[in-house]
Image (cartoon, rainbow, N blue to C red):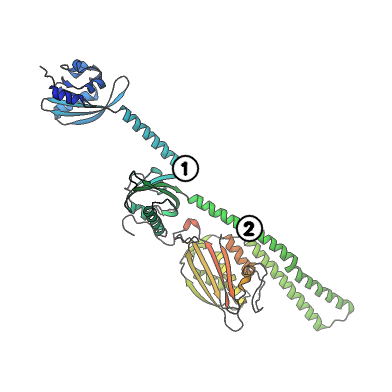
C-alpha cells in the first residue's frame, strides 16, 4: 500500500521527544519514525519508512511486540509491557496506542532504570537480612505540623511486633495499641514531645504481640527536616531488647547476691567469733561448776537442779543459734516454683507458721492490698512475711496490743509506668527503734528494740534481707522510739509474666 510521510511540523515535534515513536499502518508498515526510535532500534528513519517493521527489523518477528501489535489490531485496546531487545539485552518500556489507520508505538530505554531498581532491590534485601541478623528494625513516622499522619515499618520491624509483612496496613493508632497498656501514656507523651520540640527520642518499653507474647523493645529516633526547615517525620530504629533486659536483670541480681554473700560471710565469721562463743563459754563455766560441786561433795539437790536448768537453757540457746544460722545460709540457695499468689493468702500462711511455732500470739493484721494477684515464690514470700510479723510481735510495746498494717502495691523503680515491681511494707505499733541504726537491724543476731524487751535470736530480719536480695530486691527500715517501725521491701516480679495479671491485651479494633 502507498505510504505517506509524516507532515513536517509533526515530524519536528516527534523528533523533539526523548522517547522513540513509530507510526504504523494496520499491517505494521512504518509510516513515521522519529530520531529517538532510530537511535534505540538501529536503522535510520529513511531505512524504516515504507517497510514493514518485520522486514526492517526481522529479529522482532515472533517477539512480544509482534504479539501485542496483533492483539491491539484485533481488539483495538492499548497495551503496555517490557521488551528485551538487541545483542546487549537492552530493556525497553513499550506502549501501543491504536488509532483509526493503524497504531502508534512508544519506546523508552529503561535499561539504566531497571539496573538501578535491581541494585536497590538487592540492597534492600541485604539490609533486611542484616536487620534480621541484628534484630534491628527501621521505622518512619510522617508528621504534619505536630500531628502524626502515617507510619511505615521495615520487614524486621514487622517481625519484632509479631505481624506478617503486608498482612495489615500499619497506622499510628494501630501501632499505639501494640504498646503495653501500662507503657502507652509514657510512649505517647515522649513521642509528642519529640515532635513538638524537634528532638531525638530514646525509649525502652514493652509491646504485646497479637498472640499475647510480651516483648521489650528499645526505640531510637531522630527528626527529619526538609529544605524549608519544616519537620516532616521522625525516623529511627527499633530493637527487640527482651533477652538483653533479662540478661541485665540477671546480672544485677547476681552482682547483688555476690555482694550479699561477701557481707554475710564476714558476718558469719563474726558470729562464730562472738555470738556462738559466748554461750559456749557460759556452758563451759556451768559444766566446770557442776563438776567442782560433785568432786567436793558440797552440792545439794536444789543447786543441782538450778545448774542443770541453766545448762539446758544455754544448750537450747546454742541450738537455736545454730538452727537460725543454718536457715540463714540455706536462704541463699533454696527456692520454690512460681505460682499465682496474693498478699492475703501469704499472710494467712505466715500466721499459720506463727501459730504452729513458739512465737507469741500473732498480731492484729490490717491489710491494704493494691497489688492484686501476682507471680512469686510462695514459700520464700511466706517466710519473709512470717519473720516480719514475728519481729513485730517480739518488739511489741508493753502498753498495747500489737497491730501490723501490711500494704502492697505495684510500682516502677524508675518512676515510669512499667509496674513490674512489688512494694510490700509492714508498719507496726511496737516499741520502735532509732532510725539512725536502721541498717544494723538486718545484721544477724542484732536487736535494737527500744525497751530491751525484744525476744528471739535476732536472725529474723537478717533472713528477710537474705531472701529479698535473693529475689533481686531490696529492703529498708525506719522507726521511731515508742511509736513503732516500718519495714519496706521492693522486689521485681518475674519478667516472663509481667502484664499477665493485668489481663490487658492490645485491641486492634477499638480505641484507647
Residue sitting at x 32%, y 21%? 88
- Label ID, residue 259: 2
**Left or right for 344, reference 435:** left
User: Quick one: label 2 or label 1, which is nearer the N terminus?
Assistant: 1
Q: Is residue 443 visible?
A: yes
User: Residue lying furthest right in this view?
Assistant: 296
Could you tell me residue 134's position as x and y percent? 47, 42
User: Residue visible at 47% across and 65% down?
Assistant: 410
- Mark 2, secondary structure of its residue: helix
Above or below, comparing residue 117 to residue 59 in the picture: below
Q: Identify the residue at the far front of this view.
A: 228
- CB of mark 2 within 8 Å of CB of mark 1? no
**Residue topped by disc 1:** 134
Badge 2: how crowded within 10 Å, few (<14), some, or many (20+)? few
Residue 316 x, y percent position in the rendering: 72, 73
Percent coordinates x, y for residue 66 in the rendering: 21, 23
* Quadrant in the picture for the N terminus: top left
57 over 161 or under it: above or below? above
Where is 425 relative to 80, above or below? Answer: below
Q: Is residue 321 left or right of residue 193?
A: right
Q: Quadrant of the C terminus?
A: bottom left
Q: Quadrant of residue 337?
A: bottom right
Front-lying residue, 413 or 491: 413
Look at the image and tell me whether residue 377 can be seen. Answer: no
For marks 2 and 1, give the CA distance: 34 Å
Tell me the crowding category of disc 1: few under 14, some 14 to 19, or many 20 or more residues within 10 angstroms, Cα based: few
Q: Quadrant of residue 154?
A: top left
The picture places residue 111, in percent across and down from the top left corner, at 31, 27
Residue 107 horizontal side relative to residue 309, left or right:
left
Amino acid at each position: 500500500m502507498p505510504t505517506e510521510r509524516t507532515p513536517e511540523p509533526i515530524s519536528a515535534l516527534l523528533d523533539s521527544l526523548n522517547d522513540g515513536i513509530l507510526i504504523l499502518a494496520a499491517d505494521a508498515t512504518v509510516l513515521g519514525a522519529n530520531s529517538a526510535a532510530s537511535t534505540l532500534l538501529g536503522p535510520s528513519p529513511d531505512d524504516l519508512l515504507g517497510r514493514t517493521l518485520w522486514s526492517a527489523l526481522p529479529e522482532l518477528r515472533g517477539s512480544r511486540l509482534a504479539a501485542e501489535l496483533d492483539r491491539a489490531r484485533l481488539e483495538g485496546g492499548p497495551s503496555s509491557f517490557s521488551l528485551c531487545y538487541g545483542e546487549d539485552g537492552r530493556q525497553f518500556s513499550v506502549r501501543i496506542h491504536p488509532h483509526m489507520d493503524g497504531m502508534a508505538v512508544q519506546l523508552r530505554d529503561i535499561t539504566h532504570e531497571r539496573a538501578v531498581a535491581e541494585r536497590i532491590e538487592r540492597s534492600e534485601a541485604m539490609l533486611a537480612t542484616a536487620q534480621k541478623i541484628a534484630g534491628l528494625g527501621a521505622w518512619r513516622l510522617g508528621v504534619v505540623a505536630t500531628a502524626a499522619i502515617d507510619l511505615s515499618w521495615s520487614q524486621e520491624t514487622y517481625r519484632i511486633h509479631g505481624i506478617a509483612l503486608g498482612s495489615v496496613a500499619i497506622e499510628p493508632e494501630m501501632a499505639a495499641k501494640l504498646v503495653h497498656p501500662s507503657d502507652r501514656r509514657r510512649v505517647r507523651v515522649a513521642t509528642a514531645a519529640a515532635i513538638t520540640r524537634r528532638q531525638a527520642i530514646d525509649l525502652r518499653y514493652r509491646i504485646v504481640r497479637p498472640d499475647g507474647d510480651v516483648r521489650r523493645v528499645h526505640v531510637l529516633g531522630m527528626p527529619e527536616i526538609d529544605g524549608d526547615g519544616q519537620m516532616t517525620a521522625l525516623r529511627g530504629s527499633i530493637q527487640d531488647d527482651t533477652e538483653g533486659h533479662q540478661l541485665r536483670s540477671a546480672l544485677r541480681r547476681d552482682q547483688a547476691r555476690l555482694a550479699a554473700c561477701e557481707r554475710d560471710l564476714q558476718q558469719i565469721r563474726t558470729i562464730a567469733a562472738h555470738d556462738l562463743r559466748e554461750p559456749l563459754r557460759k556452758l563451759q563455766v556451768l559444766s566446770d561448776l557442776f563438776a567442782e560441786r560433785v568432786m567436793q561433795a558440797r552440792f545439794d539437790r536444789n543447786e543441782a537442779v538450778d545448774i542443770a536448768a541453766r545448762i539446758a537453757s544455754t544448750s537450747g540457746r546454742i541450738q537455736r543459734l545454730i538452727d537460725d544460722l543454718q536457715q540463714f545460709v540455706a536462704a541463699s540457695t533454696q527456692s520454690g516454683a512460681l505460682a499465682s499468689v496474693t498478699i492475703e493468702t501469704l499472710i494467712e500462711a505466715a500466721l499459720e507458721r506463727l501459730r504452729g511455732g513458739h512465737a507469741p500470739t500473732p498480731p492484729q493484721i490490717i491489710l491494704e492490698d493494691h497489688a492484686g494477684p501476682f507471680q512469686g515464690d510462695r514459700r520464700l514470700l511466706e517466710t519473709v512475711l512470717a519473720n516480719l510479723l514475728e519481729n513485730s510481735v517480739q518488739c511489741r510495746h508493753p502498753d498495747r496490743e500489737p497491730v501490723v498494717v501490711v500494704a502492697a502495691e505495684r510500682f516502677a523503680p524508675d518512676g515510669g509506668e512499667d509496674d513490674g515491681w512489688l512494694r510490700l511494707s509492714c508498719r507496726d505499733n511496737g516499741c520502735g527503734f532509732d532510725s539512725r541504726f536502721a541498717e544494723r537491724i538486718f545484721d544477724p543476731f542484732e536487736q535494737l528494740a527500744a525497751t530491751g524487751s525484744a525476744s528471739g535470736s535476732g536472725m529474723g530480719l537478717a533472713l528477710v534481707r537474705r531472701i529479698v536480695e535473693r529475689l533481686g530486691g531490696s529492703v529498708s527500715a525506719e522507726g521511731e522510739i515508742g511509736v513503732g517501725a516500718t519495714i519496706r521491701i521492693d522486689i521485681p516480679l518475674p519478667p516472663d509474666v509481667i502484664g499477665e495479671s493485668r489481663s490487658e491485651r492490645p485491641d486492634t479494633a477499638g480505641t484507647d
